């Protein structure tokens, strides 16, 4: 941890001040660190646009190698990924990988899910620095969420898959643990989701407002353990933080979620990331020949560790 005592003649934006002190930091790294609660201003999480003044205290829970701008930056970032991605499926047009919680799908860091996927494909002699097309993410998961991610291996597959996701033809089912048991034990949640870009959060509204988008989430209770419930959740719409905000809006936040959840319970149960896993992806029927063998294909991630612990009552 780094502790900075602010020394500036005039109020300065928090992000600008940090980038002055550590040139290796950039907006992408700062936003990621803020999302992960690694930046505290006077003991609290504050937007990066907050003005800091002389005497303020900033705590950075960021590794030294991420603050050091003297590191060797030669060569593609994917070669510096920590390890190859965990692969669930690898075909001519599509790669399906299992993302661990805490790993960003992409961004300024070398060790991202996409770079791990490229490292894997390189090990299979399917990708190199000379390749004309770089495999592309078809959708994203929050850093703290684990589970399946689709990566297109050709531009044709990317176009088809992006359109299928945009038209809600790809069915996404999640497993999660909530602090509190939803009543009724299964149901459909509706409403409107409104983003607060400054705070990096969303809120669920019962009525439409300018800028708000309709959301719909279906859930089913699989098991309960003490104060906790294991749910299977299906996204009807796919919005930012949709499951996290929707479950919190009915008083059943995702366990481990520091943004929308119960932080006292998170500390008590020692969860660093939200207990939320993109567990199942079901592809639609494709009319395009290049994806014909993927029509109706169902992919599953390994069940997360908390699944068994709710069933046997270890986690409660």
Image (tube, helix red, strand yellow):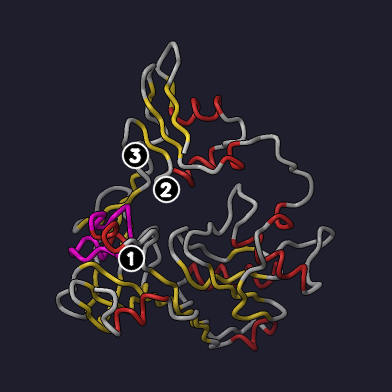
Q: Is residue 184 left or right of residue 189?
A: left
Identify the mark nearer the N-term, 2 or 3: 2
Q: Is residue 309 above or below residue 35?
A: below
Label 2: which secondary element:
helix
Q: Is residue 160 left or right of residue 55?
A: right
* Crowdedness near tag 3: few (<14), some (14–19) or many (≥20) residues, C-alpha within 10 Å: some
Q: Say which of 142 and 79 sits in front.
A: 79
Q: Does the magenta segment cover residue 222?
A: no
Identify the mark nearer the N-term, 1 or 2: 2
Residue to which mark 1 is pinned: 243
Question: Which region of the structure is painted magenta?
Answer: 246-264
Image coordinates for residue 248, horizontal then vertical, percent: 24, 61
Residue at mark 1 to residue at mark 2: CA–CA distance: 17 Å
Image coordinates for residue 122, horizontal then vertical, percent: 77, 67
Residue to which mark 2 is pinned: 35
Residue at mark 2 to residue at mark 3: CA–CA distance: 9 Å
């Amino acid at each position: 941890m780094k502790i900075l005592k602010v020394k500036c003649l005039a109020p300065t934006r928090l992000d600008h001040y940090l980038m002055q002190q550590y040139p290796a930091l950039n907006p992408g790294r700062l936003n990621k660190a803020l999302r992960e609660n690694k930046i505290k201003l006077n003991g609290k999480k504050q937007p990066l646009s907050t003005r800091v003044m002389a005497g303020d205290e900033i705590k950075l829970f960021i590794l030294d190698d991420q603050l050091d701008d003297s590191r060797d930056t030669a060569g593609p970032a994917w070669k510096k990924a920590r390890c190859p991605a965990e692969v669930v499926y690898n075909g001519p047009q599509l790669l399906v990988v299992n993302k661990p919680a805490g790993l960003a799908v992409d961004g300024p860091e070398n060790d991202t899910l996409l770079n791990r996927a490229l490292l894997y494909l390189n090990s299979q002699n399917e990708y190199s620095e000379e390749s004309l097309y770089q495999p592309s993410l078809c959708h994203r998961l929050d850093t703290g969420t684990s589970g399946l991610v689709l990566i297109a291996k050709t531009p044709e597959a990317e176009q088809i898959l992006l359109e299928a996701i945009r038209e809600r033809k790809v069915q996404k089912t999640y497993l999660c643990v909530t602090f509190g048991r939803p009543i009724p034990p299964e149901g459909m949640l509706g409403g409107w989701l409104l983003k607060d870009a400054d705070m990096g959060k969303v809120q669920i509204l019962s009525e439409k407002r300018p800028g708000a988008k309709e959301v719909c989430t279906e859930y089913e209770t699989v098991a309960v353990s003490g104060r906790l419930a294991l749910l299977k959740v299906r996204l009807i719409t796919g919005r930012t933080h949709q499951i996290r905000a929707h479950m919190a809006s009915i008083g059943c936040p995702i366990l481990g979620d520091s943004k929308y959840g119960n932080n006292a319970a998170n500390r008590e149960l020692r969860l660093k990331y939200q207990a939320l896993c993109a567990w199942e992806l079901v592809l639609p029927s494709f009319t395009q020949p290049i994806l014909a063998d993927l029509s109706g294909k169902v992919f599953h991630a390994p069940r997360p560790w908390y699944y068994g612990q709710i069933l046997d009552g270890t986690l409660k």
